Image (spheres, rainbow, N blue to C red):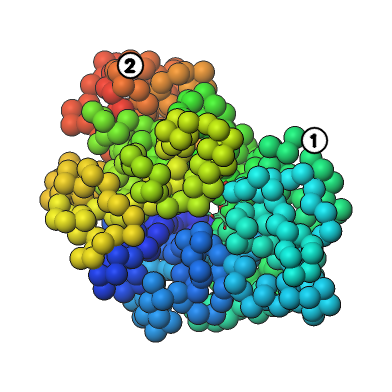
Amino acid sequence: MKKTWWKEAVVYQVYWRSFYDSDGDGYGDLQGLIEKLDYIKHLGIDVIWLNPCYESPDKDNGYDISNYYTIMDKAGTMKAWETLLDEVHKRDMKLIMDLVVNHTSNKHPWFLESRSSKDNPKRDWYIWRDKPNNWRSYFTPSAWEYDETTEQYYFHSFAVEQPDLNWKNPEVREEIYKMMRFWLDKGIDGFRLDAIALLAKPEGFPDAANPNDIRYLTNNPGLHDYLREMNERVFKHYDIFTVGEVAFASPEEGLKYVAEDRHELHTLFHFEVCDEMPSWEPLRFKQIQKRWYEALWGKGWNSQFLNNHDHTRQVTRYGNDKEYRLESAKLLGTMLHTLPGTPYIYQGEEIGMTGVRFSSIDDYNDIAMKNKYEEEVAKGRDPQEVLESLQPLSRDNSRTPMQWDDSRHAGFTTGTPWIKVNPNYKDINVKQALEDPNSVYHYYRKLIQLRKENPVMVYGTFRDYTETEPYIYAYTRELDSERWLIVLNHCDHANDYELPAPLASYKRELLLGNYEDIQEHGAVLHMRPHEARIYKLV
Ligand code: ISL
């Protein structure tokens, strides 16, 4: 297996608008991030993924870009961004930028030109048709919006304010490659490529048999030609790391994006867990891990994550955010950092932040949730019932401000935060976590340190011994003569796990665990609620 820095790295995702506000306007900003870089470095992070901070009308929190070459006012200035890059590099970390090239804002000058007349030179930069097909978009009942000026419909995979670029047009592609080089030449270390599975559209836009199954938006023919071209024209000329957001891919499909001999992307986020497994389903999760491992190992590289700015915090969604919050947050961290692939930490995960339930739709900001709410209420459904059905997976669950301390607004801002702070900030915050040796934060530090010192956690082969076990997840990682065993009890009650013969014959040395005293009787491990252990087998 080829060794590279991005396989060994631990990535920290900064959703800057909710990270730290340096100027009291209620939005986190780049200067705020600069002030907290030592905190991130102290955790042991190698790479920061920064959510989009380009100029934007901000209908979808920066994923609707109106100028790729400037920084949004809320985030700061280009000068602040340059200082950020410098300060990240000074601390021996790397910075990857989130980039949205599937669509722009409807306020982008390219789109303003494109919509102005049918014979405008930029008409074909977007996708226009006389008649819509029956597709939905991610955020609206139709993927087409009628535009009166030219009496045609334009295509949008997300909100109406996010028209899709026409990747078939070579001028569009050239312009995007030029823009990518602009950022790479400034010295960034790579990209997180938003919605990259959506670039290609099917010839003629045939109606879907089931318009509610929006898989038709992704993985269409021609996509990999674009990615190969992008690599050829841009990526391969830099020592960078690219991670693609690849919705609805099977492992076989996923391999096409990341196979080392195909020269497209370095790694991907697949969403078989976050988009398709609403709550914890152990047997399904283990199957997913196994299938992706078997498809990718030795050929391409995977990522490990259970939450991000689109997905409810992992301890709430997949663990226990009540009586076992600490144990559960540590168990999930142990799992993500010991499964094969690069681990991602979403800001606040390292202190075990949880999801929220706001009592009114007015407290929510997420365009996906708000559009869905309106759509359902318009059908005559009870608003309270709709609200309650949307709360568990609202993207705002993970977008509440970072909880720094127990002061007003959790120390995030001196002004009024753009979105409410989670009311549990008095108990769950960074200050508390730094002071408490038993905190999730200190556990994550140890986990990351362990990964840095032990290549087996990165390059070791993987084997699951518990494919049919409902609660215990026990697997090994092996590299040369090094053999590690990870045992997790993903459950609110204790379980005994008897090691199978090949594992029982080794001596066990505990490297890390989330309980004080280890209980084992011969080959039987007594695993308490949400207990996690990492052993070295000798
Ligand atoms: O979160 C999802 C649904 O639960 C995902 O399917 C997600 O919407 C999709 O993968 C695309 O997300 C990305 O592009 C969107 C933006 O709103 C998201 O924040 C971003 O991560 C449009 O640019």
Asked where in the image residue 161 lies, by quadrant, the reply is: bottom right
Q: Is residue 477 visible?
A: no
User: How many other residues sit within 10 Å of disc 2, few (<14), some (14-19) or many (≥20)?
Assistant: some
Depth check, mark 1 against mark 2: the one in front is 1
Q: Position of residue 368 (x, y in %)?
A: 52, 48
Q: Position of residue 239 (x, y in %)?
A: 55, 71
Q: Nearer the viewer, residue 269 or 52?
A: 52
The residue sitting at 20% across, 55% down in the picture is: 410
Residue 8 drawn above or below residue 322: below
Q: Position of residue 8 (x, y in %)?
A: 45, 55
Q: Nearer the viewer, residue 385 or 230?
A: 385
Q: Name which residue type carries label 1.
A: Ala
Mark 1 residue CB less than 8 A from any atom of ligand 1: no
Where does label 2 land, which residue? 495
User: How many other residues sit within 10 Å of disc 1, few (<14), some (14-19) or many (≥20)?
Assistant: few
Q: Position of residue 50 (x, y in %)?
A: 44, 64
Residue 383 drawn above or below residue 189: above
The residue sitting at 36% across, 42% down in the picture is: 360
Q: N-terminal of the two: label 1 or label 2? A: 1
Give the SS element for disc 1: loop
Q: Is residue 368 visible?
A: yes
The residue sitting at 55% across, 33% down in the picture is: 380
Left/right placement of residue 118 relative to residue 463 reads right
Left/right placement of residue 380 relative to residue 222 reads left
Q: Name which residue type carries label 2.
A: Asn
Residue 209, label in figure: 1
